[in-house]
Image (cartoon, rainbow, N blue to C red):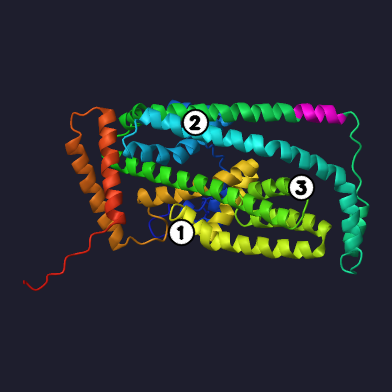
Amino acid sequence: MSSEAGPGKVSGSRAPSQPPPAASQPFVERRRSANNVARTVRFEMSPSMILTLILVAASLWLLVRLAPILLVLVVALLIVGTLSPAVSWLEARRVRRNLGIAFVFTLVFLAAFLLVTLTIPSLVAQLAALFEREPAFRAGMADYLARFHISAPLADWLRNIKYGAPGSTVGATAFAYSLRIFEIAAYGTSAIFLALYMMIDRDRLRGGLFAVVPRTHHIRLSRVMMNLETIVGAYIRGQVITCLLIGAFTFILLTACGVENAMALSVFAAVADVLPYIGAILSIGPAVIAALGHSPTAAAIVLAAMLAYEEFESRVLVPRIYGRALRLPSSVVLFALMVGGTLMGLLGALLALPVAATIMMLIEELRVDLPGEQEQVADTELRARDDLAEEEYERRTEGVAAEQAAAIAVEMSVDRKFEESHPTEPEVPGNAG
């Protein structure tokens, strides 16, 4: 007789156990089972992204391959920025532009030719004399340093310096350097002629640049170009002036103290003065060492005079020559010099400061908001003036060709710069007479 379990009753035989529901499983077991499931991650790139990456890689490769050509272009722009103020000055006195360009370039070539012909033969002779007298000069320096206990190890080091025998490497080294000098001369000549053509075709080149830029940005573009010309021109002219001054001062000082090979040492001081801060040490050191070989008194006089001149240059000459063109903090100057010198050597150190000043100018002119910087009332007023200038420019250049529009933009930027540098004072109402 079978008995059925009714509701609320328990049957005699236990039913087989059923697995507990998933909700009652422990959390750790459920997570482990989920992790055991293999997941596949796919990176799918669209054809447009692949094409963009290929174009970027090709552009970087082309940039590396054309680095010398780009360097020629940069040097040409530096020449243009340096000589353009002189041409503009002649234009303001009713001299035709092409005639002014020819006069300025002729004057520069003549000055360079005279400088080379008057200094290079004497410089080569003095360098040869320095190499011939180097063993005797080194021995005298070692004897002088051996008198003091502190500098005695340095004297031993000077005596034990061994130079490798020239052997058969002299010819190969001279040939390699001659090829390098020929290459630099070719690139330099190309940069000069490129700068000449750029100055002659200024209006067409500027019109082509303005044609590819939207007209809503023409005023800002013209102001950036004008500031860039000011920065580059002021820096290069300042470098030329300060280098010539310290070279002349060093030559007169060493000649007056009776130091031999004054021409070679003065040229080295002029070249070293290109580098701020570091150039002072590089220019003073060789001059003092050469004077020490003559007499300790001459060395002391040269050291004191060179230090005084470096202080005069940094405190008086540099602020007056450069003016407000660079406006770089000392930390930015030092960092830019290290980066430029590491990447491109002496030329990189020469270009580092105008590049850094250009970046700072672009941040200021384009109104780039830096992280953590709060917008000031003056920034809001400048933005409003920019908008008004752009509206006026669009009204004045409606239906005008690109070259004429570029000239109008430059004219408006010059007028605005003049207004900013010569602010008009508000009139104070006086008593009516």
Q: Name the spot of residue 29 as percent of width and height, x first.
A: 56, 53
| Mark nearer the N terminus (3 vs 1) | 1
Query: Looking at the rendered structure, which numbered label has been put on residue 10?
Result: 1
Is residue 172 shown in magenta? Answer: yes
Cα separation between marks 3 and 2:
32 Å
Secondary structure under the numbered disc 2 in the rendered image: helix
Label the magenta part by its dominant secondary structure. Answer: helix
- The quarter holding residue 405 reads top left
Q: Residue at x 30, y 57 (%)?
A: 379
Q: Is there any visible trace of residue 2 in the rendered image?
A: no
Q: Nearer the viewer, residue 80 or 45?
A: 80
Which residue is identified by label 3?
261
Q: Amino acid at mark 1?
A: Val
Image quadrant in which the C terminus is located: bottom left
Query: Looking at the rendered structure, which numbered label has been put on residue 106?
Result: 2
Q: Residue at x 41, y 55 (%)?
A: 370
> Residue placed farthest to the left in the image?
433
Cα separation between marks 3 and 1:
121 Å
Q: Name the spot of residue 373 as percent of width and height, x first.
A: 39, 60
Q: Amino acid at mark 2?
A: Thr
**Residue numbers of the magenta segment:** 169-176
* Relative vertical location of residue 414 with respect to residue 117 in this rendering, above or below: below
Label 3 or label 1, whichever lies nearer to me, is 3
Query: Looking at the rendered structure, which numbered label has been put on residue 304?
Result: none
Secondary structure under the numbered disc 3 in the rendered image: loop
Q: Amino acid at mark 3?
A: Asn
Is residue 111 shown in magenta? Answer: no
